Image (cartoon, rainbow, N blue to C red):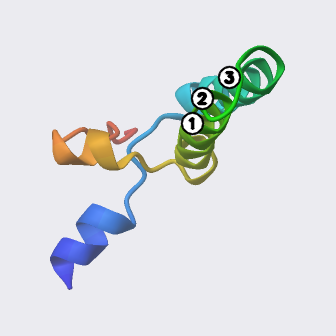
Amino acid sequence: MSFLKSALYVKNVPNGERAVRIIAALAIAIGGLATMSAPWNWVLVAAAGGLGLSGVFGFCPACAMVGRRLQQRR
């Protein structure tokens, strides 16, 4: 259980980066739908969805795989 708790439930994206990820996801999705033709626009929307979800939840699986953790405030 300790692996699941440390790997799945610990936020590893700081708040400032979370906001940037959400804004970037919105911009990528809107830009992809407005400028690209199918099926590439849906590929960009799917990528933006993943980026947006990592911003909303504060957990990035790629960052977790390389061992990124938030610094604890003292």
Identified by mark 3, the residue type is Ile
Q: Residue at x 17, y 73 (%)?
A: 3
Q: Residue at x 77, y 14 (%)?
A: 35
Tell me if residue 54 comes above or below residue 35 in the rendering.
Answer: below
Q: Residue at x 68, y 32 (%)?
A: 38
**Residue 2 visible here:** yes
| Disc 3 element | helix
Q: State which quarter of the image contains the C terminus.
A: top left
**Residue 69 visible here:** no
Name the residue beneath numbered marker 3: 28
Work out how far the residue at label 2 is from the one at label 3, CA to CA, in angstroms. Answer: 12 Å
Work out how far the residue at label 1 is from the one at label 2, CA to CA, in angstroms. Answer: 5 Å
- Is label 2 or label 3 in front? 2
- Residue 59 lies left or right of residue 25; in this view the side is left
Identified by mark 1, the residue type is Val
Identified by mark 2, the residue type is Trp
Q: State which quarter of the image contains the N terminus.
A: bottom left
| Disc 1 element | helix
Work out how far the residue at label 3 is from the one at label 1, CA to CA, in angstroms. Answer: 11 Å
